[in-house]
Amino acid sequence: MLTSSAHPNLRAHQPLSPQDAAELADLARRLRQLAQAGAVPPLLRGKNIGLLRASHNGEVSVLLLQAARELGAHVATMRWSLSGASQPGEVRHTGRMLGRLYDALVCQGMAPEQVRQVGLAAGIPVFDDIAADGHPSAGLADALGGDAPASENRRFVLQALLVDGLA
């Protein structure tokens, strides 16, 4: 397990500590080995993940959906319609409601402050743009080494983040 905060959104765009990065990379390597052996365990079976998107970001969303579904999670994709002009109470109410429906949320293309507010209200892990190239975990795909293409390594890093956050 990573030794990060209970809510990943609170450290989403901060560098990973060396220990967190090493643990995450180790978990991603183990997941890759299992996949190569054809034995991907359904570690997220029964988990419901909400994917909130401010706009359609096809490639990033597809990679995230594939990573979660391979581990047995159910993923619902929703368009985020609240804006920076939305009342704080509306954002908190939405976060509480989503926290009752899902085991975790992944937010893409949302303002960091809104992600933080949703995470505080939801009471579940809320990931901020974990599939984006700018996320601190993106560099870990290269560090995994091996013969797998970078996109596959990125998928395993995403799986490691999800498993760690939901376990």
Image (tube, rainbow, N blue to C red):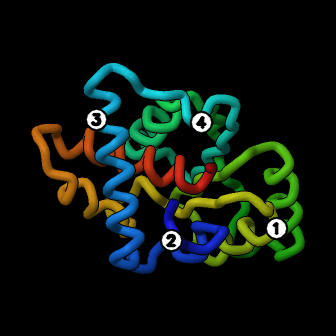
Q: Residues within 10 Å of mark 3 (few under 14, many from 20)?
A: some
Q: Which residue is mark 2?
A: 12
Q: Nearer the viewer, mark 1 or mark 4?
A: 4
Tags 2 and 3 touching, CB below 8 Å? no
Q: Residue at x 33, y 77 (%)?
A: 18
Which amino acid type corresponds to the residue marked 4 in the rendered image? Answer: Leu
Marks 2 and 4, how far apart at CA: 21 Å
Instruction: Decide which of tag 1 and tag 2 comes sooner along the chain.
Output: 2
Marks 2 and 3, how far apart at CA: 27 Å
Q: Secondary structure at mark 3?
A: helix
Q: Which residue is mark 3?
A: 33
Q: Secondary structure at mark 4?
A: loop
Instruction: Decide which of tag 1 and tag 3 comes sooner along the chain.
Output: 3
Q: Residues within 10 Å of mark 4 (few under 14, many from 20)?
A: many
Which amino acid type corresponds to the residue marked 2 in the rendered image? Answer: Ala
Above or below, comparing residue 41 to residue 1 in the picture: above
Q: Which residue is mark 4?
A: 44
Which mark is on residue 132? none
